[in-house]
Image (tube, grey):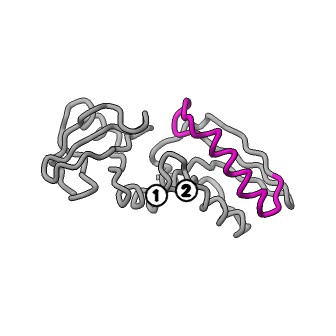
Amino acid sequence: MVKTLFYIEDPVINQTLYEVSDPEIPVLSIMDMGIVRDVKVDGKKIDIKITPTYSGCPAMDTIAVDIKKALEEKGFSVDVELVLAPAWTTDWITPSGRKKLEDYGIATPLEKSMDKRALFDGERIVKCPQCQSHNTIMVSQFGSTACKALFKCEDCLEPFDYFKCLK
């Protein structure tokens, strides 16, 4: 599992990026999601590359603005560049991010082959984030966003989003 491709030496920059939330899943930072792909620092000038969770993700403009605002408030000059390659994968969600997803009520991505079995074959392998049961069914291929599917637990009867595996 890829967690990050770089190390940010400046603790202010690092902490600030961990404070920028994903606008669609506010309990996750952009670092938890693994969309920050590169950070170059030259004094007070920062160049940041971000990768969308999928190519049409509507949140990327907001994320870029939020990054610039947060770091400019700390006295930095910031350029944010959107990069599409390599394509984002759910493997880039940090372990901490996965835990935050579940605590927020969103089932975390399964491995690619398991994901297909859950989404296309209807296998009951997606775990309910409320009661941990695997007695779940898919209600819709699409949940609150295109990268999620809507499921329902047949034990606790709660609906929940499942974050689809993207590789």
Q: Position of residue 113 (x, y in %)?
A: 30, 38
Amino acid carrying mark 2 in the image: Ser
Q: Residues within 10 Å of mark 1 (few under 14, many from 20)?
A: many
State the CA–CA distance, disc 2 to disc 1. Answer: 8 Å
Checking the image for residue 29, the label placed there is 2
Read off the residue under disc 1.
Answer: 97
Q: Secondary structure at mark 1?
A: helix
Q: Position of residue 29 (x, y in %)?
A: 55, 56
Q: In the rendered structure, which segment of residues is drawn in magenta?
A: 52-77
Checking the image for residue 27, the label placed there is none
Residue at screen point 43% across, 33% down? 146
Residue at screen point 46% across, 52% down? 1
Q: Quadrant of the C terminus?
A: top left
Toward which corner of the image does residue 149 lie, by quadrant?
top left
Q: Is disc 2 in contact with disc 1, using a CB cutoff of under 8 Å? A: yes
Image-based side of 54 in relation to 134, left or right = right
